Image (spheres, rainbow, N blue to C red):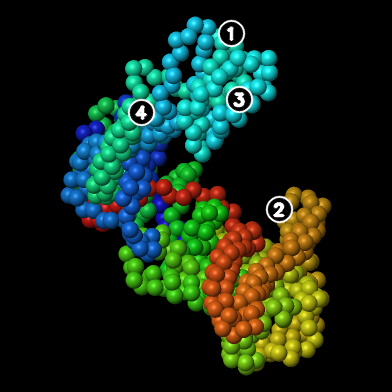
Amino acid sequence: MAKLKVMSVELIAPISEKEKILEYLQKKGTVEITDVSDSGENGASDPEKRAEIAGSVSLIEHALDILNARAPEKKPLTAMLDPRKELDDGEYRKSAGELSQTLEAAKRMVDLENEAADIDADTIRLRTYADTLSPWENVSPPEVTLKYVSVLCGSFRKELSRSDLLIYLAEALPERDCVEVETLSQSEEHSAFAVYCFEEDEAEFEQALREFGFVPAPELENVSFADKIKEIRGSIAAGEQRKAQIDAELVSMRDMHEKFRFALDELSIRADRLTANERLYGTGRVFALRGYCAEKHSAKLKKRIEGDFNAVFEVTEPSEDEDVPVILSNNAFASPLENITGMYSMPGKEDIDPTGFMAFFYYFFFGMMLSDAGYGLLISLATGGALLFKKDMEPKMKNNVKMYLFCGLSTVFWGAMYGSWFGDVGHVIMREFFGRDINPLPPLWTDAVSDTMNVLIMCFILGLAHLFWGVLMKGYNDLKHGQKLDALCDTVPTFLTVIGIAPIFFGLFAQSSVPDNYTPLGTFFFNVFTAVHTNLKSVSTYILIAGVVLVIATAGRHSASIGGKIGGGLYAVYNLFSGYLGDVLSYARLLALGMATGVIAQVMNMLGTLPSNPVVKVIMFIPVFLAGHAANLAINLIGAYVHTNRLQYVEFFSKFYEGGGRAFEPFEAKTKFYRFKEEL
């Protein structure tokens, strides 16, 4: 529940040490470099080098895509939890020295793929050409030497007789009766003919024939149709043979996966180093680096840099006007939610880190929204198994897994409270397959579907507690910064006013007697709520009046005039009532999403038991159960995540959290596939 103290750092060293120092800092990943490259050649950009790196990255990515398509790696489903491969300094430098050979191999692979694509295109073109020649493979078009006579040789892509063609020509050109047709070949797919006519009528006959589907015979020089087709087939066979060689060569390069992945990481490292270099200030002989570092790393970093390099490394307190980045540090229970805080906004200078304060409610509400113990058990077993058997996961992945572990455990709790274990599957199985109308897994508290009103009241009470927790955080933050009056005036009047109006609000929903189907735990909760509500209601009017008076008296305290103070107080009262009413009602989503999960689960169980035949019912129940509950879990898991975040961002954070801070962005090796060992 804290922000790490961040220090300003400055480094000055000879230009000859620059690359070594940047490489070391990048591997350590504990310093954020700020831009001070206002002059000097050392901070100049190198667009040509950037373009070269970008081109190499594009080449490697293309080659890796080709390799994944030709020789994909078989990885288990759990591979997504595997950490990046660890490299020591010797392994890294050896692989980095082979980058040029890797780029050559990638270029060779891309060239082979392009050649294979060209062969495929040529094969399509040659086969299409061969298809146009196929009707003439065993035919020799007649050669006409008669004066004033032309011959039109061609084919139709259908079975057609000589008489059919003559009839068509007679109907199409009735005034041109001087025509002769010779059948050259005939099949179910093609019919080839030679049409003789006078030279002056050739254009008309050709137009009429084309309208009937006539395709003129190809023109070849000094070669027969049969020989040309044979030549084309030979070219196709040669192309296929060459393509088989290319395929074999590409598959033989399957061991390049690792080298290509390393090349991508190395190129990313070099690109980031170029960016860092552009942020430096240099004179030609020395260079300067400024930035930020967590205080806990600064002493060790100073000792290492000044001991291993010819450099001066200064660590100082940042000034008030510096834009100091934020580094969050929380315990194992809260740290998985640092990403949730970061998605909203990092804490500003005056903010406390809200992550630890929201952790309990976040997990609690998530489970209440998903609210099925069977689903929670699956999530808990999957995430717990991952943490147990994949202990070397990446930190970000491990935090995500931890978050869902806690969410899963909360879901088991609320599912058991509601009696939802894959919906009502226990009751359904006992009734449909064993003929006993009993529920082996009854709710510990109540059934949310049938006892909607009491569960809704519980949601409102939890929501009010969540909002009050946010108000307390506001008071705590004020006290932390020495603002004792603000802490008192912004919390106590709010608590009194809301507590005073709460019995009236809850009285609109409360039931007068314990429901018949309540469990002992449910009865206990109901009696406690009724007692508190009754006793509080008797004094709530006085509490409400005191709260309203205090709000009017204190909310406008920063105004200079009496009228402004009173007006500010009245406006604050209005905002308090309207704001808290809307905020508390927002927590109805805890019930709505929980009911959605339970109702859909029950529907899936019902669909699986629709057949009356016992054998068919068993056969149908299993796939419907598996598919239906898998879909229900996936959909409602997303819903629980989104709406739990919303309750934190909109209702909770609005009570005390400003945000606006900037996350710490260290100069580090942003690699996807490899990481450096700690000793580096």
The alpha-carbon separation of the residues under discs 1 and 4 comes to 32 Å
- Where is residue 186? Give x, y as percent: 49, 33
Q: Mark 1 belongs to which amino acid?
A: Glu
* Dot placed on the residue nearer the N-terminal end, 1 or 3: 3
Give the residue displayed 78% in from the left and 73% down from the top: 505
Q: Which residue is mark 3?
A: 166
The alpha-carbon separation of the residues under discs 4 and 3 comes to 28 Å
Q: Which residue is mark 2?
A: 558
Q: Nearer the viewer, residue 113 or 437?
A: 113
Crowding around mark 4 (Cα neighbors within 10 Å: few <14, some 14 to 19, many 20+) is some
Q: Nearer the viewer, residue 47 or 17?
A: 47
Give the residue displayed 59% in from the left and 88% down from the top: 433
Disc 1 element: helix
Give the residue displayed 77% in from the left and 61% down from the top: 578
- Where is residue 511? Give x, y as percent: 78, 83
Q: Which residue is mark 4?
A: 226
Crowding around mark 1 (Cα neighbors within 10 Å: few <14, some 14 to 19, many 20+) is few
Instruction: Tell which tag, 4 or 3, sits nearer the viewer.
Output: 3
Q: Which mark is residue 200?
A: 1
Disc 2 element: loop
Instruction: Tell which tag, 2 or 4, sits nearer the viewer.
Output: 4
Disc 3 element: helix
